[in-house]
Amino acid sequence: MEPVALTEALATFDAVWSPRIVTTVNDYDVRLAKAEGEHVWHVHEDTDEFFLVVTGELTIALREKDGERDVVLPPGSVLTVPRGTWHKPFAAPGTAILLLEPAGTPTTGDAHDPVPDHVDSTTGHAWHP
Ligand code: NI
């Protein structure tokens, strides 16, 4: 059990939209990801998804019952996307985010639009210092 410095962890990989599991909390992963450009529209039917913006700026497009809207998250902001809500994150260059979700949750959800090459469809990658 050792602390993880997020800035140091971010320096160990370059891939965007490809989360690293930096620690776990009970049955949840704490995932650190670089983000740039568009992710993909997707939905997690059975779990909420928590976002914390570490650096940069993350926008999350949401499909809600009244239509679509964009939520902008500057650094230090958190947002939980409720289960069953279609969403598509997109990010400015240099963005880093921390995600909390149950271990095994795919980044592209249970249903999604076609996944572009720059988006890693994964349940997260192990990270070691
Ligand atoms: Ni998601």
Image: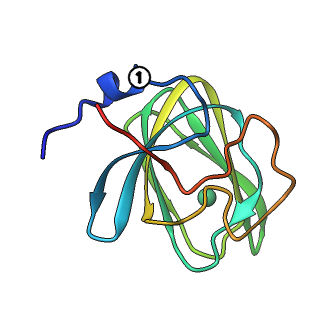
Q: Left or right of 8: which side holds 38?
A: right
Label 1 amino acid? Thr
Q: Residue at x 16, y 38 (%)?
A: 3
Picture quadrant where residue 105 is located: bottom right
Dot 1, crowdedness within 10 Å: few (<14), some or many (≥20)? few
The quarter of the image holding the C terminus is: top left
User: Against 3, is 48 above or below?
Assistant: below
The image position of residue 128, as x and y in percent, is: 32, 36
Q: Left or right of 27: which side holds 75?
A: right
Identify the image's colour scheme: rainbow, by chain, secondary structure or one colour. rainbow
Q: Residue at x 23, y 36 (%)?
A: 4
Task: Assign a secondary structure to mark 1.
Answer: loop
User: Against 30, is 56 above or below?
Assistant: above
* Front-most of residues 72 and 26: 26
The residue furthest bottom is 46
Disc 1 designates what residue?
12
Dividing the image into four quarters, tell me where ligand 1 lies. bottom right
The image position of residue 7, as x and y in percent, is: 33, 24
Q: Residue at x 61, y 55 (%)?
A: 107
Q: Residue at x 61, y 39 (%)?
A: 17
Q: Left or right of 57: which side holds 103?
A: left
Please give the count of numbered marks on the rendered protein. 1
Q: Left or right of 95: which side holds 40?
A: right
The answer to whether the beta carbon of the residue marked 1 is less than 8 Å from any atom of ligand 1 is: no
